[in-house]
Amino acid sequence: MPVSYSSLSKIPTCYATVSISHTKPYTLDAKLEAISSAGFKAVELGFPDLLEFAKDWLDTDVKEDEYDKLCVAAEEVKSLCQVHDLKILVLQPFSNFEGWEPGSDEQKDALARAHGWISIMKAVGTDMLQVGSSDSFNITSDRDRLASDLRHLADLLRPHGFRLAYENWCWATHCPTLSDAWEIVQLVNRSNIGLCLDTFQIAGSEWADPTTEDGLVKHDGLDGLPGLRAKFHRSLAKLSTTIPADKIYFLQISDAYQPVPPMKDKVVDGLRPRGRWSHDFRPLPFEEGYLPVTEVTRAVLETGFRGWFSYEAFDGGKDGKGLPESREADLMAIAKRAMVAQRELLSAAAQYTRPSEDQMHITYRGQETNQLS
């Protein structure tokens, strides 16, 4: 589908609260004020932010499963967002739900969390739950069972008019790619389940790899770098031609730094390499990352999608250890940089043209740009 710049002018913008200056302990109210003042119209409400807000608001310790207390706090957060003229687009991140052995303690915990989060959604006034593909180690690989669990979750949400936005996490155990997530969504076969697409998760699973010297997926068997590039372009073409726009609930946006030296290919503190990469190495677009953010965005727009663009950038600097104080101290500046990135991204995506199959096999020209052509 053609993409004209004029067709992008009304795309609504959102910011994930957990990601704005995520290495500094700012209050949720301060985050909301900065996000609103920069011109964003919605937030992804992060459960960690709600939990910390509840502790401060109620002046008591609040545990993750004390849903009555969390709902009281959620009602106040709803009021705060109304003051700042912000919609709560989604509650996130709900994780490790699907794939547990039936009747196991893990499955019982997952279901209890689902009911608790639904109560929070009602209190805070959002109709969407973001669910990341599970990264738990001891879950089934049976896709029918994974889909069955998510179908049950969608059915729990449906009586309330709620939707499930399923996202491929690029370090997930059995569903790390967009193709995996879309297959699962189709197997679930419910009207209230769709996709949360993410420029980092898409490119971070199929194009980039934080454990290799060049920062890219291993490509020895793909006719080298031109082969990797051609394979990735075909994947983006498949995205733009096979996923209906109404099954894309929102698009999350961030770039990534290439870790130098590469990360060790092992589990650390329960996280696979791509999970650690996601946590601290994700700047805004056009801020020295190396992922093909423009190309992924263009492919999403070619579906006809013109819904929410949501910024979720976990920027811990190129070494993942934190940004200089001068860049972390001003929430307003961070939010404004994200809005600048939004304008630049829309312009770049509108102008971008995916190369033909022949053009895909021209000599690779280095990683100084996140453009693949």
Image: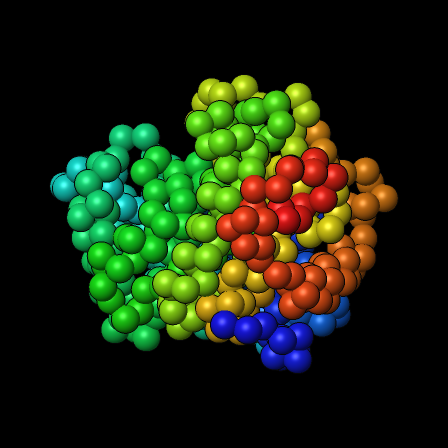
Residue farthest to the right, as pictured: 326
Q: Is residue 213 above or below residue 327?
A: above
Answer with left or right where residue 116 lies relative to residue 277: left
Taking 192 as reference, is 9 left or right?
A: right
Q: Residue at x 51, y 67 (%)?
A: 302
Vertical comparison of 327 with 9: above or below: above
Question: Where residue 34 appears, x then y in whole percent?
Answer: 73, 63
Which of the pair 74/86 is nearer the observer?
Answer: 86
The colour scheme used to paint the residues is: rainbow
Q: Residue at x 18, y 48 (%)?
A: 144
- Tell me the residue at 44%/27% (across/down): 221
Q: Nearer the viewer, residue 7 or 56?
A: 7
Q: Is residue 238 above or below residue 262?
A: below
Q: Position of residue 38 (x, y in %)?
A: 74, 67
Residue 99: horizontal and vertical position, in percent? 24, 42
**Residue located farthest toward the front when viewing the structure as drawn:** 358
- Residue 332 showing in the rendered view: yes
Residue 95, image x, y percentages: 38, 46
* Residue 61 visible: no
* Total numbered labels placed on residues in the image: 0
Residue depicted at x 38% and y 69%: 244
